[in-house]
Structure formats: structure tokens, C-alpha cells
Amino acid sequence: MAERIGFVGVGRMGANMARRLKDCGYTVSAVYDVNRSAAEEVAREIGAAVCRSLAEVTATSDVVFTVVTNDKAMAAVFDGRKDSLLVGAKGRVFINCATLSPKVHRDLEKRAAKAGAESLEACMASSIPQARQGTLYLMCGGKASVFERMKPMLTQLTNEGATLRYIGTAGKAAEVKALVNMVMNINTAGLAEGLALGQALGLDLSMLREVFSQTGANSRVLQTDGEDMQNRDHSCFFSAAHAAKDSGIAMALGRQKKLTLPLASASLKQFQRMVKEGLGELDKSGVAELTFKGRHRSKRRKA
């Protein structure tokens, strides 16, 4: 536990990962976030320094976790002309946890190696409570040797290592994560339509959810989102905007392989519509607002 750990991106996921590693005895030495007040709050709690630059994070850390939103944000922390995590990065390890295009991870591994550093993707298929509890599901990609070196640390973020998986070379874990979220988003949109039709038919939705849970309509999404869809509780654990972004990554992979993915395409359009309608910051369960009768009046209809 001698490694000094830095975090770039301390929103709800990053902050809880930092808290978890602190609880496990690691030294979280530095935090950085474009939202400085968020960084200051987490830093006070765990005894870390708030860095004013990305280069400062690298200088004061041995291992740096990045928990950013998308490809563009990732480019900003590694490719910045005035500031970059790769400045003075020799000997450092970067563990990148965002859902990104696989090519970004492959390119970053090359750029990190050129700077004398190493990188590992650790894609998360879990949410905020799991980050705090240390029960994340992590899918890792990169050099096997780097994974083995970081495994003790990553084990502390997972269910005693039971939910820690090495997928393969750089970009491969990102491919799997894109597919996980693509299928999850299809299931979410499908569940919303099933419940919406049930309501329109005058069925009791609590009864319908119970029947779903005992039949072929059962899914993980039913457990996490079904009641929220019924009660219109869309407190955000995984936003519609992120759902749109992640399904978009999967669709791009499908196009590269010349595959037709009609269900993925349809669900992507629903989450993109949420973003356009100003609902992008709702949880993905908010897709039900587009399907239940009388819930959401489209901006397009107002026009």
C-alpha cells in the first residue's frame, strides 16, 4: 500500500472510489476536478491535496485514476497543450475507468508508453453505491503484466476480486463495456414500453412487475428501474445522456463491422431524444417519461 494515488474526476463515482481506497489504507495523495468545489470537498474528507494542474497530479502520485465523462474529456486530461497528465509521467500507471471508444484506450497506451508510463482500462459496470462499498464490477484491458501489478489495489474496489475481470489487450474491455451498456439500454427502453402499455391497458403495475420478475420478461433492469419507472422516481445513478453516449459507441462498433443493429439503434434514438427534450440528466429509467401516456409533452409537439 505504498503507492500514492491520484484521482482526476471526483464526481459521485470517482469520489466514492477515492473514499473506498482511503478506507482500505491507501494514500490518496491528490485530487483534481474541473469542479474545484467538488475536489475541495473530497480532499478535506480524505486528507488529499487539491491540485491546480494535471501535471501536479502526476507529480504527486504513483497511480492515477481517471473517471471522466467521455472521449473529449479524456483528450483534455492527456492531450492538453498547456497541461497534461503525461507531463513527467515516467514510471506512473494510469487507470482509466470511463466508458470510452476502444480506440482512445489503444492510443493512450501508446502515448503513455512513449512517456515512460503505463495505462490500464478498468471499465465499470456498476453504480454509485458499489463504488463506495467496494463491490464494483471491473473489466480491465491492457498489458497483462500491468493488470497483475495493479490487481491488489483493484481488488479493494471489487467484491474481494470476485467481480474483477481481465478481458484482454487495450480496447477489449472497452468493447465489452460498450456491449454491456448497449444491451442494458435496450432492456431499459423495452421495460419502459412494457410498463407503459400495461398502464394504458389499465393493469396494476405492481402486479405486472411481479409477473415480469417470474417469467421471461425478468431482467436486471426490472430490479433496478421497474419501480422507479412506475413511481416516476428518476434520481440519477446512470444518466440518459450517458446511456446515449454509450449506445453510440456500440453503434459505431457495429458500423465498423458492417452489422445492422435495429434494437440498439431504436434505443439509442430514445435516449438521444431524452437529451434533446432536456431530460438527459435524469436517470436512464426516465426513458419511461417518453412512453407512458400523459407524462411528457415533447418539445417537437409544442413547436
Image (cartoon, helix red, strand yellow):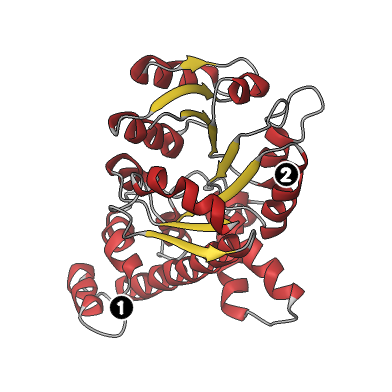
14 or 271, nearer to the observer: 14
Q: Secondary structure at mark 1?
A: loop
- Residue 47 horizontal/vertical position (percent): 38, 16
109 over 263 or under it: above or below: above
Query: How far is the residue under mark 2 from the one under mark 1?
Result: 59 Å
Query: Given this view, does label 2 or label 1 mark the residue nearer the observer?
Result: 2
180 or 58, nearer to the observer: 58
Q: Secondary structure at mark 2?
A: helix
Describe residue 250's horizontal placement relative to residue 159 as left or right: right
The residue to which callout 1 is attached is 201
Residue type indicated by callout 1: Leu
Looking at the image, the residue that sits furthest to the right is 81
Which residue is at a point 47% across and 53% down the rendered structure image? Answer: 148
Which residue is at a point 63% across and 34% down the rendered structure image? Answer: 91
The answer to whether residue 270 of the structure is visible from this angle is no
Describe residue 87's horizontal placement relative to residue 266 as left or right: right
5 or 105, nearer to the observer: 5
How packed is label 1: few (under 14 Cα within 10 Å), some, or many (20 or more)? Answer: few
